[in-house]
Amino acid sequence: MATRGIKQLQKLQIFFCEHGGSSRQVREYIQSGKIVSFATQNPTVQVEATLRNGNHPFVKASYLTGFSKQVCVKNEDVERIEKVIKMLNDSSGRKITKITNPVKTDTPSVQGVWTPMLDIASKPFAVEFK
C-alpha cells in the first residue's frame, strides 16, 4: 500500500528450512523464480530468503512506519504463499482498528445525501464567470 505515494513495505524476509517438509512449498516458490519476479516488480522492497533449519517457514514484512508483520506459511501451497506476499505488499503495516462509535466532525460534508432521484446530469445549469 502506498501512503501519499510512498510504498510502505521496506523489507520482505522469507524464513525456511532446507530439510523440513513444512518448508517444501516455500523452497519450490523460491526455486521457481517467482520471488525474483516479485523483487524486480517492486524495486523499493528489499527481499531476503533466509535459511533457518529446524523451524517452520514464515514471511516477515517490515514497514517504513516501524511496524512489522509475520505470517506463518507452514504447509501452504505456492499460490497461498503468493497471496500472503501480495497481502503484505499491499498493506500499510498498521494494526486494524475497529471504529465503534460514529465519526463526528466540526466540518460536516457539504455534499449532501445521494438518492436515486437525484439526477444532476440531466438538469441544465448556468455557469457565470466573474
Image (cartoon, rainbow, N blue to C red):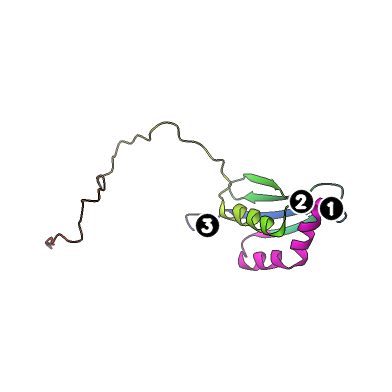
**Figure disc tally:** 3
Q: Quadrant of residue 47?
A: bottom right
Say left or right for 55 vs 89: right
Do the CB atoms of the residues marked 3 and 1 lie less than 8 Å apart?
no
What residue span does the magenta drawing correspond to?
22-46
In the rendered image, which quarter contains the N terminus? Answer: bottom right
Q: CA distance from mark 3 to mark 1?
A: 38 Å
Type of secondary structure dominating the magenta stretch:
helix
Relative to 41, residue 106 above or below: above
Which residue type carries mark 2? Asn
Which three-letter amino acid code belongs to the residue tagged 1? Gly
Q: As shown in the figure, which amino acid type bears the numbered disc 3?
A: Ile
Q: Are marks 2 and 1 in contact (CB under 8 Å)?
A: yes
Magenta stretch: includes residue 36: yes
In front: label 3 or label 1: 1
Examine the rendering and report whether any part of residue 130 can be seen: no
Tag 2's secondary structure? loop
Task: Tell me which residue sits at (49%, 36%) in the image.
Answer: 98
Give the quarter of the image for residue 50: bottom right
Identify the residue shown where x is 67% and y is 68%.
37
Outermost residue toward the top in this view: 101
Q: Position of residue 127 (x, y in %)?
A: 13, 62
Depth check: give the residue in front, 115 or 46.
Answer: 115
Earlier sequence position, callout 3 versus callout 1: 3
**Image mark for residue 21:** 1
Q: Circle 2 sits on which residue?
A: 75
Percent of width and height locating residue 99? 46, 35
Residue under numbered circle 3: 6
Cα distance between the residues tagged 2 and 3 = 33 Å
Label whose residue precedes the other's in the sequence (2 or 1): 1
> Foreground residue, 52 or 65?
52
At x 63%, y 56%, the residue is 83
